């Protein structure tokens, strides 16, 4: 019992003296005015990314970041059963960002994948695929916002 108390006190003392800062603590502290100059590719994914970027933009900031991006969405067959009919799909979203901050031009690529099974109802499968697109677009926009926050 005494060892446990000593260990807890030692651990708290150790953590209080280090300069630990969570990586995601700066995610919502982007102090830029984000201007989306152009985007191309999948319309649904691009609209979701643009909406998330506008939401995190600070319109009163003097620092301006111009962003243009190109999105490629692919849906491929991942598996088939013994009869040859499709059972699993894989969706892949690749987004190429071009960020111009002051006089610096930075280019980077974000890729996200998701696997899902084929559904019997085509309508439900289409709705499910739309939800997957929105979720992947949200992940991509969060990665971009985090990158902007870390590179300050």
Image (cartoon, grey):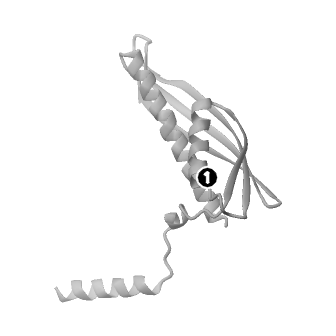
Whether residue 37 sits left or right of residue 146 in the image: it is right
Visible residue check, residue 54: yes
Give me the residue at 67% from left, 61% from top: 32
Residue lying farthest to the right in this orientation: 103
* Residue at x-position 68% and y-position 57%: 33
Q: Name the residue under label 1.
A: 144
The answer to whether 137 is drawn above or below residue 3 in the figure is: above
Closer to us: 25 or 35: 35
Quadrant position of residue 41:
top right
Residue found farthest to the top: 83
All told, the count of numbered labels is 1
Q: Where is residue 97 in the image (x, y as percent from the top left)?
A: 70, 46
**Residue occupying the far left of the picture:** 1
**Up-down: is 148 above or below 51?**
below
- Name the quarter where the N terminus is drawn: bottom left
Residue at x-position 38% and y-position 21%: 124
Q: Where is residue 108 in the image (x, y as percent from the top left)?
A: 70, 49
Give the residue drawn at x 52%, y 31%. 91
Which of 136 and 49 lies nearest the eye of the viewer?
49
Q: Where is residue 35 in the image (x, y as percent from the top left)?
A: 71, 50
Residue 44: % across, % down? 57, 32
Q: Nearer the viewer, residue 50 or 92?
A: 50
Q: Is residue 37 above or below residue 104?
A: above
Q: Quadrant of residue 26?
A: bottom right
In the image, 88 versus 39, the foreground residue is: 39
Say if 49 sits above or below 129 in the image: below
Horizontal arrangement in the rendering, residue 69 relative to residue 2 (left or right): right
In this view of the protein, can residue 118 be seen by the observer?
Answer: no
């Amino acid at each position: 019992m005494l060892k446990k108390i000593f260990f807890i006190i030692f651990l708290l003392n150790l953590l209080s003296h280090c300069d630990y800062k969570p990586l995601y603590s700066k995610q919502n502290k982007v102090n830029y005015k984000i201007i989306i100059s152009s985007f191309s590719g999948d319309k649904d994914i691009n609209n979701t990314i643009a909406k998330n970027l506008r939401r995190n933009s600070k319109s009163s900031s003097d620092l301006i970041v111009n962003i243009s991006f190109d999105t490629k969405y692919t849906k491929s067959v991942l598996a088939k059963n013994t009869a040859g009919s499709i059972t699993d799909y894989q969706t892949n979203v690749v987004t190429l960002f071009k960020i111009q901050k002051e006089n610096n031009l930075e280019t980077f690529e974000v890729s996200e994948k998701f696997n899902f099974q084929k559904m019997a109802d085509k309508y439900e499968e289409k709705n499910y695929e739309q939800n997957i697109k929105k979720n992947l677009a949200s992940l991509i926009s969060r990665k971009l916002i985090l990158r902007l926050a870390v590179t300050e």
